[in-house]
């Protein structure tokens, strides 16, 4: 499997249910943002859509969605605008999904040859489009199709893509966890992924 060309980390939400910036949640001695950046490494380009922090590595670019808090679709568009023009594949990851880098690396990138996106689903078939890989060309085309972007849902964006859904195995379901509330964080820290 080839390497993903670039990553977008969606980190600029209001975190209203959690009560503070989720990018700075500490899990096992590191913030969620730091965990993602370290998991991706220092070679692959990363665009962080959110408030700039002290991560100043050469492979990281920072941006914000327009308008601020305009939703994940506007964040993806902002991230794509900063993605290297040579990128053909891109992983889109929500910062509040601590295991998402491992998930997207486990997806078969060659499947993009016949699809616009490869999106994992849980056991109930619920898709996680903010933990997925996309064809850059197809993603740009889909974004153009749903302009204006503010307030648009990931479901609407995905409706303009030829998506392959991959159901994760039962013993990998924990990897799709996202931390929306303090209770979710405690479950992750305790190893309870229910």
Image (cartoon, grey):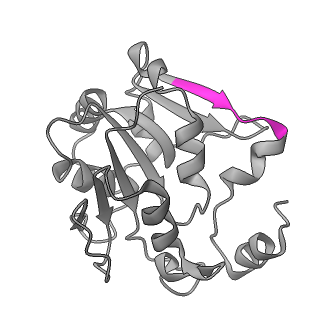
The quadrant where residue 97 appears:
bottom right
Image check: 145 left or right of 33? Answer: left
Foreground pick, 141 / 4: 4
Query: Foreground: 155 or 96?
Result: 96
Residue at 23% across, 36% down = 87
**Looking at this rendering, what residue extends furthest in the bottom direction?**
20
Q: Which residue is drawn at 41% across and 43% down?
A: 91
Camera-side residue of 92 and 68: 92
Q: Horizontal and vertical percent for residue 88?
A: 27, 30
> Which residue occupies 53% across, 51% down?
101
Magenta highlight on residue 29 = no
Q: In this view, does 151 lie above or below 169?
A: below
Q: Quadrant of residue 159?
A: top left
Q: What stretch is highlighted in magenta?
A: 164-170
Please state the horizontal and vertical placement of residue 26, each as a whole percent of the image.
59, 82
**In the displayed structure image, the side of residue 160 where residue 93 appears, left or right:** right
């Amino acid at each position: 499997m080839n390497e993903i060309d670039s990553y977008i980390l969606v980190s600029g939400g209001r975190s209203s249910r959690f009560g503070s910036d989720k990018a700075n949640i500490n899990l096992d001695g590191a913030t969620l943002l730091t965990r993602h950046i370290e998991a991706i490494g220092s070679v692959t380009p990363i665009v962080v859509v959110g408030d700039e922090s002290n991560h100043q590595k050469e492979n990281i670019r920072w941006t914000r969605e327009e308008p601020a808090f305009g939703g994940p679709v506007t964040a993806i568009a902002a991230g794509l605008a900063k993605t290297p023009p040579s990128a053909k594949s891109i992983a889109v990851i929500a910062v509040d999904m601590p295991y998402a880098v491992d998930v997207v690396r486990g997806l078969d990138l060659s499947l993009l040859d016949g699809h616009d996106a490869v999106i994992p689903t849980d056991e109930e078939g619920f898709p996680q489009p903010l933990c997925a890989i996309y064809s850059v060309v197809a993603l740009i085309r889909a974004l153009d199709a749903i302009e204006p972007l503010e307030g648009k849902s990931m479901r609407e964006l995905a409706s303009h893509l030829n998506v392959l859904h991959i159901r994760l195995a039962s013993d990998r379901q924990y990897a799709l966890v996202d931390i929306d509330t303090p209770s979710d964080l405690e479950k992750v820290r305790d190893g309870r992924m229910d």
